[in-house]
Image (tube, rainbow, N blue to C red):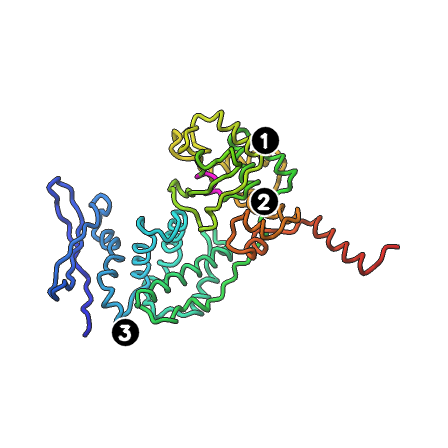
Amino acid sequence: MRVRHQRGYLRCVKRKNGQLMWEFLWREVGPNGQLVRRTVVIGSVEQYPTQQEASDAINGLRVSVNEACNRQPHKSVLIGDLVDHYIEKELGERSEWYSAATKIIYRDFLRVWIRPHWAPLNVHEVRTVAVEEWLRQLRRKDDKPLSNSSKAKIRNLMSVLFNHAIRHEWLEQGRNPITHVRQSAMRQKDPEILSPGELRALISQLNAPFNVMVLLAATTGVRRSELLALQWQDIDFANLLIYIRRSIYAGIVGKCKTQNSNKPLPLADYVARELKTWFDNTQYGSPEDFVFASPSQKGELPFSPNFVMTTIIRAAATRAEISKRITWHSFRHTYSTLLIANGEDIKVVQELMRHGSARITVEIYSQAITKIKRRAQTRVVRMIIPRK
């Protein structure tokens, strides 16, 4: 028997306190087989000034109401509705599948790239080749081609989206059209790696706490979201350890990127002393205070990573006569590269970087230094052509 599809009913009601609220009403089959009316509050008129905005806000809920109907073979689900349902179920505040940063990034990718183009199509109409062609022509606001890494992230998110449809039985098993979409993630240029001398010069041009930030980032490889989320209770001065317990992105504190990210990191003596000096001088030294608390935020939030990088660190790099374009990830790439250049065991490097596999460490994060490569090449030449 076919289950009837419901659009539901959206209405604006006035509460006893005088506030105007949007409500969504629908009917569903109760335990006794009878239709039961359900009502849920969507939000206030201040949140959604127009009926269209309120209607857009319930798209994900409307798909949930029609889950049984959507499973029927004759029924199609629009990509736009699938996106809304995925955001509601997987990227909402109650969902624990992703970190706060990942949720924000996924929502932005869905809003900016995927929804505008694919929303009108139903899940059965998306074709592999069409997705490949669409990815190829994506461009940034300045009309430059979108980077391969960004395209790869969009492609992967689309695959996750269709797996969501399969999981809810709106699409048949094995029918994910993104599975065979080809999209390279190869970088168009290698990330900047700083030499030990450049790091020393950069740190010498920085005052506390920014010199400590760079020192910590370059000697532990922590991600910027983890670095800025550190609290004093995470620093074990006695045992020289740092515990990575949270991350922060766009001012929202959440869990770390992966399970491997939560592993404690060793802290070198010199770095620990520099941290302790900053601890003795900061006005925010309680256990739950951020290590790099922002005075302008009265210590409630850490410094903005974008402000620190663009205004403080890059200005210091200019004074140090460093022409490389430094990003927060430059310190992480530098750390991995220097570890490998020192001949450290790849498993040790993987553990220090907290990667899920050694392949990520070798293929993505580490570059062989030219001097090391030349020395290795020379050894081979000497094996072939003996010195006279």
Report the side of 300 relative to 331 (left or right): left
Q: Residue at x 34, y 53 (%)?
A: 91
**SS label for mark 2:** helix
CB atoms of marks 1 and 2 within 8 Å: no
Report the side of 29 relative to 353 (left or right): left
Q: Position of residue 230 (x, y in %)?
A: 45, 38
| Residue that badge 3 annotates | 73
- For the N terminus, which image quadrant? bottom left
Q: Residue at x 61, y 48 (%)?
A: 337
Q: CA distance from mark 1 to mark 3?
A: 66 Å
Q: Position of residue 181 (x, y in %)?
A: 46, 67
Q: Give the vertical position of 300 relative to 15 (above or below).
A: above
Q: CA distance from mark 1 to mark 2?
A: 20 Å
| Residue that badge 1 annotates | 205
What residue type is disc 1 on? Gln
| Residue that badge 2 annotates | 335
